[in-house]
Amino acid sequence: MTRGGTTSVLVVDDDPQCRRLTLRLLGELGYESTYEAASAVEALLMLPRVQPGIVLTDIAMEQESSGLVVVEQVRALGIPVGLISGIAAYADDPLLARLPRVLKEELTLESLAALISTLQADG
């Protein structure tokens, strides 16, 4: 199982319960440097300051597809990005089709570790 280290992780989700769960699981995986954003706007403002090694984002937040903006900006910076979303419908979106993902309903220690492992291998 992937273990944390020096990689910092930014979690972007407007659902506080999902953010807390993701941050708790990251802590259990040994990630000590974690950040959270409750919106796409907040995440984009944080990026230059926190310079995360990985970004995990929801897609449908305060605006239907605001997570797409996060994905585009993060990818432009060369930062690995994974999706933690409650909506499977975005699986057919060409921008998102190749991104590693976990459905919120399936978010466990093991699924998060696998997602991060994939991001680190691809990154």
Image (cartoon, rainbow, N blue to C red):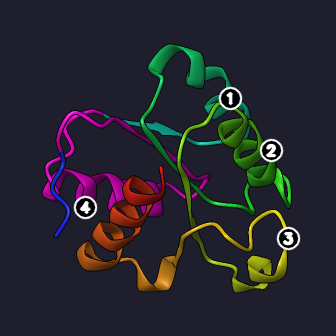
Q: Earlier in the sequence, mark 4 or mark 3?
A: 4
Where residue 27 appears, as percent x and y from the top left, is 19, 50
In the image, is residue 87 above or below residue 85? below
Question: Which type of secondary structure does the marked residue at label 4 adopt?
Answer: helix
Range of magenta residues: 5-33
Contact check, label 1 and label 3, Cβ < 8 Å: no
Q: Earlier in the sequence, mark 2 or mark 4?
A: 4
Q: Where residue 25 is drawn, which disc sits there?
A: 4
Q: Where residue 94 is drawn, which disc sits there?
A: 3
In the image, is residue 75 above or below residue 22? above
Identify the image quadrant of residue 28. bottom left
Where residue 42 appears, as percent x and y from the top left, is 65, 30
Residue at image coords 73%, 32%: 41
Q: Amino acid at mark 4?
A: Leu
Taking the image as shown, residue 98 lies to the left or right of residue 63, namely left
Taking the image as shown, residue 109 lies to the left or right of residue 58, namely left
Q: Earlier in the sequence, mark 2 or mark 3?
A: 2
- Please tell me which residue lies in front, 92 or 78: 78
Contact check, label 2 and label 4, Cβ < 8 Å: no
Residue that label 2 marks: 69
